[in-house]
Image (cartoon, grey):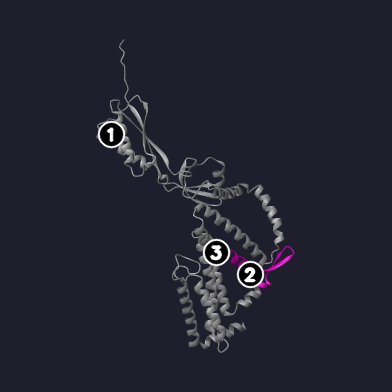
Amino acid sequence: MDELRRFLADLDRGATPWEIGTLAASLLVAYGISWLVGRKRRGDSVWFGQALVDGLLFPLLALALTYTASLVQGRFQPVPLLRIAVPVLLALAGIRLLARVFTLVFPHSAMARLVERLFSWLAWLAAALWILGLLPAVMREMENIQFAFGTTDVSLLAIVQGVLSSGLVMVLALWLSAALERKVLQDTVADLSLRKVAGNAIRAVLLTVGFLFALSAVGVDLTALSVLGGALGVGLGFGLQKLAANYVSGFVILAERSLRIGDTVRVDNFEGVVADIKTRYTLIRSLGGRESIVPNEKLITERIENLSLADPRILLTTEVAVTYEADVDQVRAILLEAARGVPRVIAEPGPGVHLVRFGADGLEFRLLFWIADPQNGSGGVVSEVNLRVLKGLRAAGIDIPYPQRVVHMVQR
């Protein structure tokens, strides 16, 4: 309470012009340095954010300058305003770090937004306790609250410090993995699927190393993890084998590149484009907007049609019947011209026409043509070819026969 009374007494004296000017100069210098360094930035980043002040660099620079100024001016006069600014800027820097890293790594995660909001509340609460001089007293009370874990007593303060330190290590590991994926893999690895597996592997390794460092930092004996590893192995062997199989299959798919992001595939009569390959499942999006979530193990163990693995071109067909009186060569020319007139039909290999059978009602022709963009669907191009065939036959006076039946009347 003595610190609180001393702070209130310093606050009653008011902030001096020197103190106000120092704080304003620190903020302006921090903003100027951030602007000079980040004026050529592209897109969103952890250091600069979207508007410089919402990144990490600005509060860190302002914190360093303000803290230095408080140490210098504190030798000559009370600095209550700078004492308030230091914890505020420290809390702001922590919130900006967590927010920018989570936005970069988990851009659409509701859980990440919840953790970010919870940390913001705790950071501002800690800053308020620091400003009022109550933080040491609160820490002493937390130290007195003990929890028994077996034969070891752990204080609430140790638990909170361990959570914060381990969280900081994990956030830095996520930041480093995202930076490597964006700056290094994006420039060196052109294939999106290979970049995905490399990014997942880097993130898994860094998170594992970060987790071990965090446990070591809070005083956990890492040799005890061998027992946990054995228990986890037994769990994977029994109850979690399907889940483990999906995760392993995801890495196999990404490494072998049997399926790639952007490929057109057909799984259980569901045709669509591979939108994303996660470590547990693959997301397939159809042209109609429906999405199918397929476990990765299914893509490894069952037959899957990949329409664009070796060659994106696919063959389409349509059939038409004409009367027996029609000129066969003229019909073939009309059909070929109809296919060649559709923009999505490629010229090489070109379309072809076959007389497939002598039907009961007329001559039956099959028109074959190729497209190179199956991801855009096949129904539209087949419909356009059929319309051109119908117009060509009608313009040439060639009839498409109706079904005909001969009825014999027998009189007795």
Q: Which residue is mark 3?
A: 175
Residue 149 lies in the magenta stretch: yes
Q: Residue at x 65, y 74 (%)?
A: 141
Residue 81: percent from left, percent from top:
52, 83
Camera-near label (1 vs 2) is 1
Q: Quadrant of the N terminus?
A: bottom right
Q: Nearer the viewer, residue 148 or 99?
A: 99
Type of amino acid at the residue the image marks with label 2: Gln
Residue 62: percent from left, percent from top:
51, 77
Q: Nearer the viewer, residue 119 or 258?
A: 258
Mark carried by residue 357: none
Type of amino acid at the residue the image marks with label 3: Trp
Magenta range: 142-171
Q: Secondary structure at mark 3?
A: helix
Mark carried by residue 161: 2
Q: Which residue is mark 1?
A: 393
